[in-house]
Amino acid sequence: MTQPQTNASLNERRKNVIAKGFGSSTDKYIAHAKGAVITDVEGQDYLDFAGGIAVMNVGHSHPKVVKALKDQAEKFTHTCFMVAPYESPVTLAEKLCEAAPGDSKKAVMFVSSGAEAVENAVKIARYYTQKTGVIAFDCAFHGRTLMGMTLSSKIKPYKHGLGPFAPEVYRMPYANCYRCPFGKEHPSCDLACADYMEDFLINHVGAEQTAAIIIEPIQGEGGFIVPPKEYFKRLKAICEKHSILMIADEIQTGIGRTGYMFAMEYYGIEADITTVAKSLGAGMPISAVIGKKEIMDSVHPGGIGGTYSANPMACEAALAVFDIFETEDLLAKAKVLGEKLYSTLKAFQEKHSFIGDVRGVGPMIAMEFVLDKEKKTPAPDKAKQLVDFCLQRNLIILACGTYGNVIRLLMPLVITEEQLTKGLEIMGDGLTAIS
């Protein structure tokens, strides 16, 4: 008779065959999941405030996603869209073109991961502009591929010892109002961080060789850093002045995470190219590059694509996601969830002096921990202590940020009131315990 698996026994097996660098945040091995709850192989339920790192906005195993996958699996699982196409990617592209901010006519290409979408966005921008330079930002994260990790900012663990990196990538400061790189305060700063791009195009990379800037509307791994609302308008004006494209990396912010289908709606900006992944497929590996049609159509046939691009299973899952957002009014629910989270985290901040900042848009929200509020000395140990405390009490949360001192919340948008209350109570108890 086969012995039942435990977390410990699976972890021992893992050590023998899974590469050490392919790590996990917890040592809990999941047997099944539903909504905002995941259950490990030992039968323990965990509230999921991580959402598979912003992948499960519609919740785990949503019935409509499950049905879409079952129905498609009975028809076919793969033909390669570049060999024998089918309808679902066409329908999904229509929905993405309609949902993406701005009135410009758009076109879409599909790939399998966020990093792959970023790679292709850069390729397309370079092809269209016939320029090679790309400007990225401090605290950015864009993936673990060669171009992705080059564009990313944090050295450990994402870049350490993994070079050399891709050429023609340049980095400038981001609009981090809590830790302003220019030593100013908003709004008296008059967006010096945005205007700095004009100097950057003189002293670091010429406008005539810069194809694009790539930005996250809210920096994810960097610590949920939210720029002032007018920041991107100023950057976009500079880009248009110098014929530089703006790529919006919406891989973490997209598909409703901020209470908007795309976060650039919050800023009132139409990017030239947008990347999206994570919650698009409700756990299925799919990503997309959405761009102005003249830009997307500039690349010759075969110049972009891939064997698994527009996989039929993933496309059907993504179509189910759009259906769920519409029929369950999930964007409105997300906004309500965001208000509850913000008010609760602000109450935590009033109670605990080590919570230096609470920030976010909608339910994409975070707390930054510091040793003292005046010097803003990062407190990564406290973040780790809270993560560990919560896990011991069956709540999964994630830390992030350049210094590892930020707690981010990414629970499924379908979380129930009871589940949310319970999770926040555990967090509140944890904050008290680590004070």
Image: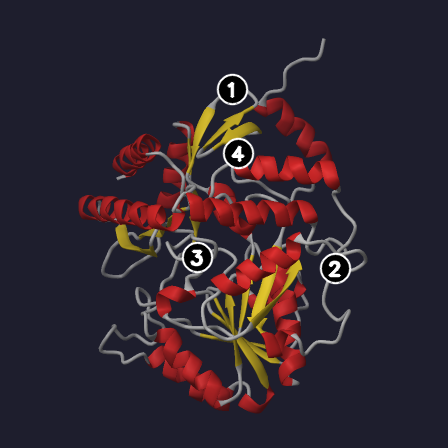
Nearest to viewer (mark 2 / mark 3): 3
For marks 2 and 4, the one nearer the N-term is 4
The percent coordinates of residue 148 (x first, y second) are 61, 63
Residue nearest the observer in this picture, 329 or 123: 329
User: Disc 1 vs disc 2: which is toward the camera?
Assistant: 2
Among numbered discs 1 and 3, the one appearing first in the sequence: 1
Contact, mark 2 vs mark 3 (Cβ under 8 Å) = no
Residue type at numbered disc 1: Gly
Q: In front here: 122 or 156?
A: 122
Q: Amino acid at mark 2?
A: Gly
Measured as percent of width and height from the top left, residue 193 is found at: 37, 78
Q: Quadrant of residue 393?
A: top left
Residue at the disc numbered 2? 306
From the image, tell me which residue sits under label 4: 63
Task: Please tell me which residue lies in front, 394 or 406.
Answer: 394
For residue 261, the mark is: 3
Q: Residue at x 33, y 35 (%)?
A: 420
Q: Is residue 60 left or right of residue 417?
A: right
| Residue type at tag 3 | Met
Distance of label 2 from label 4 (alpha carbons): 29 Å
Secondary structure under the numbered disc 4 in the rendered image: helix
Q: Residue reaching furthest left? A: 350
Measure how far apart labels 1 and 4 are at the Cα level: 22 Å
- From the viewer's perspective, is the residue at label 4 or at label 3 nearer? 4
Residue 226 screen position, x and y as percent? 36, 63
Residue that carries the numbered disc 1 in the rendered image? 43
